[in-house]
Structure formats: structure tokens, C-alpha cells
Amino acid sequence: MSLRDRIIAADDIGKRLVHVPEWNVDVEVRTLSTGMRSRMLQSATTGDGGVDISRLYPMLVIATAFDPETGTPIFDDSPEDFELIQNKSAKAVEVVAKVAMEMSGMSVEEGVEPEGKDS
């Protein structure tokens, strides 16, 4: 098997069980693909180059939160689910969003950009 084939065959989408105390549930958080991360960051970037966290966090929850029992997404990419998440506890949403960001190589401390990127 070639190196390319081994890379393609690698199961590199991580999964982590996260307890969200405010919701009293466990959520399976999955790593974003490179394409999804890029589209998400582009969609959440403001005109001045900053990141709109009020858009990014719900998008992260929608894209990365799965039911640990069934493996199915908890939310869908609808305006209704986006608004639903925006109206949930900021602390609860941040728990999931920060884990998703960490797992997907995104940094919170220095703005939202891929970790390891030179400034």
C-alpha cells in the first residue's frame, strides 16, 4: 500500500465524549474536516478580518455534535437549529465549541486560526 493510500485510508476524524453539565447530557464531539473548517471560518469572518463568535460557535456545535448512542448528528444545518443554539446557555455552547476547536486544530487564545500558523 502506497503512502498516499495509507493517508487516504487513515481514520483521522477524532471523536471525544464531552459532558455538558448545563444540559445534563454527554455529546460526542468530532473533528472538523479541513474543508468544513475552512468554509466555517470563511462564513464567520467579519469585514475587518475578525471572527464573529456568535456565528462560529453555533456552526461548530451543529457541525461537530453527535449522539453518542446512534452516531447521528444532533442538529441540522437549518436556520431553526442555528437560532436554537444561539438561544442556549453560552457556557454550554462554549463547552462543545472549544472542544471542537481544539480537536480541529483551531486556537481560541490568539483569535480563531489554525494552530501552528506563523503570525
Image: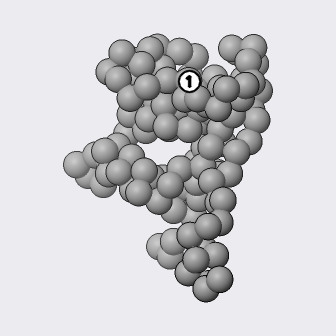
Q: Is residue 20 above or below residue 56?
A: above
Q: Is residue 2 above or below residue 65?
A: below
Q: Residue 61: tell me if it is visible.
A: yes
Q: Is residue 65 above or below residue 49?
A: above
Most foreground residue, 65 or 112: 65
Q: Quadrant of the N terminus?
A: bottom right
Figure colour scheme? one colour
Which residue does the numbered mark 1 point to in the structure image?
74
x then y, percent, for residue 102: 64, 51
In the displayed structure image, the side of residue 97 where residue 80 appears, left or right: left
Picture residue at 67% right of the left edge, 26% below the top: 70
x then y, percent, for residue 62: 48, 31
At label 1, which amino acid type do we have?
A: Ile
Q: For residue 93, what is the image quadrant?
A: top right
Q: Residue 91: tell me if it is visible.
A: no
Most foreground residue, 60 or 87: 60
Packing grade of label 1 (10 A; few <14, some 14-19, many >=20) is some
Residue at the farthest bottom position: 2
Picture residue at 49% right of the left edge, 37% below the top: 63
In the displayed structure image, the side of residue 55 where residue 114 appears, left or right: right
Look at the numbered disc 1 and give the secondary structure of its residue.
Answer: loop
x then y, percent, for residue 97: 58, 37
x then y, percent, for residue 108: 57, 50
